[in-house]
Amino acid sequence: MRRSCARPACSGRATVTLSYDYANATVWLAHLALEPHPMTHDMCDRHADRLSVPNGWALVDQRVAVTSQYDQALAV
C-alpha cells in the first residue's frame, strides 16, 4: 500500500521517515521505514528536503550516502 506524506494537504508519496527524540533534541531523517510506526512520520522528498528544526536541535539526515576515501579517489 502506498503511504502518503504526513504534511497536511500534501498528497505526495512518502519516501522518508522522520523520527525524533525530545530528550536529546534530535531529529532523524532516514529512508522510508518498511512499516509505518505511530511514533514516526512519513514524508515526501519535497517536505523532507525543506525541513528545519527548532534552534538548539540537531538534524541528522541518514539519507546521505557515506562514501569511503577509496570511493572518493575513484571519482576524481
Image (cartoon, helix red, strand yellow):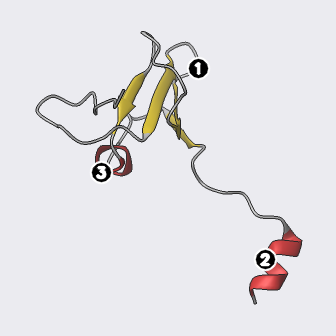
Q: Comparing marks 2 and 1, which lies closer to the viewer?
A: 2
Closest to the observer: 24 or 46?
46
**Residue marked by disc 3:** 46
Q: Comparing marks 3 and 1, which lies closer to the viewer?
A: 3
Residue at 15% from the left image edge and 28% from the top image edge = 8
Total marks placed? 3
Q: Where is the C terminus found, in terms of image quarters? A: bottom right
Residue at 49% from the left image edge and 35% from the top image edge = 32
**Residue marked by disc 2:** 72
Q: Amino acid at mark 1?
A: Asn
Q: Label 3 to label 1, Cα distance in Å? A: 26 Å
Relative to 19, is 47 on the left or the right? Answer: left
Q: Position of residue 29 (x, y in %)?
A: 50, 37
Query: For the view shown, which residue lies furthest in the front direction?
Result: 1
**Residue marked by disc 1:** 24
Q: Amino acid at mark 2?
A: Gln
Relative to 50, is 65 on the left or the right? Answer: right
Q: Label 2 to label 1, Cα distance in Å? A: 32 Å
Q: Amino acid at mark 3?
A: Arg
N-terminal label among 3 and 1: 1
Query: For the view shown, which residue lies furthest in the top direction?
Result: 38
Residue at 34% from the left image edge and 31% from the top image edge = 2
